[in-house]
Image: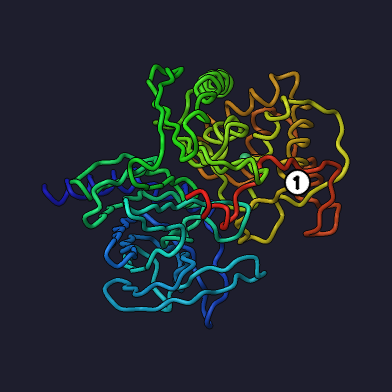
Amino acid sequence: MKSNLIIAISLLFTIAAYSNQDDQKNMLSPFPHMDSQAVFTDFINANYKINYDPTKQSATVLAEIEFVTYQKGFPVFDLVREPTSIQLDGFEVSSTSVQTPSNETTVRVLSTEIEPGTHRFILEIPITDLIRFEESGVSSAFWVTDLEDRKFLERYIPVSFEYDRVSMRFDIHFNGLTNQKIFANGKITQINSDTFEVQFPDHYTVSSVYFHTLPKGTYHQIEFHHTSLDGRSIPITVYTKENPSVMSPYKDTLLRTMTELETDYGAFPHEQFIVYHANLSDWGLGGMEYSGATVTNHRSVQHELFHSFFGRGVQPANGNAGWIDEALASWRDRGYQSRDSLSGSSTMASHPEYTRKTDTNAYGFGSSFVALLESKLKNIGGMKSFMSSFLAKRLYTPISTEQFVQDIEEFSQMKFQDLFDKYIYGKEIQQFSSQTDVINIPIHKKLNAEQLEKIL
Ligand SMILES: [Zn+2]
């Protein structure tokens, strides 16, 4: 009886943690490695014990990860820094950084070949990026960008890839620092004065998590609520280290835009919206989106809120799908234009398989391509109508460009493959070079590593 119950409960957890079929669909292919193959992994649970030590002015992460592999081979995950130690299924192992076959990116591969099935590994790793100890406490963030390679969470902690949804928990210990505030897009529980737990939703991927801690008293914060289409009261938090007056225009803008986007695309798909306002205008920058959170400025906040629907509500499964949400968001930025023709082409969805960064043609050429789709769909409610059905169908799901094409064809009962082949896969132009008739919009360029350091 008891074991049946345990099986039933663990099955429920397996389903809830998206361990099965769904994430396999977009899993990256194995590649040759050491007379065998390197195989991509399906993370199920990942628990990160994050330990800030003010005495040593250092921080470490102890990660315990349960994952599944479906083929025999050397398991692939990613972590930019060299881990201090790794245990796989109870044994000490090592790992190496390996270039993918077309040299499009680097991944980390464990040194031990394993059979398909469920495995567990434990890694220890120092945090050396985006961390600063001060008199009043510690500032630390796990901010990401998708315009550069290997700049998702792998910059800080061991993770898998965009195709993979994982149940992630942070156990955070500040070792006597009792003045810390945490902004995160998960459920935060304070265990005691210097210890917190953050549980993130099961559908999060390596591009979803927002985590920023800083000492209380070093920032200003406002909070208000939006009443969602579905009746929920959604908390919206804006905080900044700049003069508090910079936050005054946000309330109007965000409440208005929330209502607009919910009218067009359905209820806001996250439990809250967090805005970290940083002074990015001097750099001519936009921001970066997370699931129900963003680092941005007032100029770009509508674009970033849009990404909580497209980009972090329905998410790209790989670098070749990253163009979709930027094209859709930029199409809105430009006033939902329609156009009957388009010159030029791009290869936004035909980069080598393991590419992780988004093609920047998405902003300019991509949004013009969406304007072309808009004109094709004008008799059946236009792109907005497709997008709301697409979001409802694919919510919390990582998607590929191929699934996007399939969905728009299914919705419209029209053929779109040739159009995508021409403009998005660039089948008529030389591979991996692109030419467009549209100049990219500079305002949504994202922060680079050095700029992130300055706003921490
Ligand atoms: Zn964007």
In this view, 235 is above or below 89: above
Q: Quadrant of ligand 1?
A: top right
- Describe residue 296's horizontal placement relative to residue 216 as left or right: right
In x, y percent, where is residue 173?
Answer: 25, 55
In x, y percent, where is residue 243?
Answer: 49, 34
Mark 1: amino acid? Ile
In x, y percent, where is residue 232?
Answer: 38, 20
In x, y percent, where is residue 151?
Answer: 54, 57
When asked about the image quadrant of residue 59, the answer is bottom left
As helix, strand or loop, the secondary structure at mark 1 comes to: loop
When asked about the image quadrant of residue 385, the answer is top right
In this view, 112 is above or below 15: below
In this view, 378 is above or below 53: above
Quick one: 230 or 452, which is closer to the camera? 452
Quick one: 334 or 382, which is closer to the camera? 334
Could you tell me which residue is drawn at 40 percent across and 32 percent down?
A: 221
Could you tell me which residue is drawn at 48 percent across and 23 percent down?
A: 267
Q: Is residue 192 visible?
A: yes
Q: Is residue 45 visible?
A: no
Q: Which residue is mark 1?
A: 424
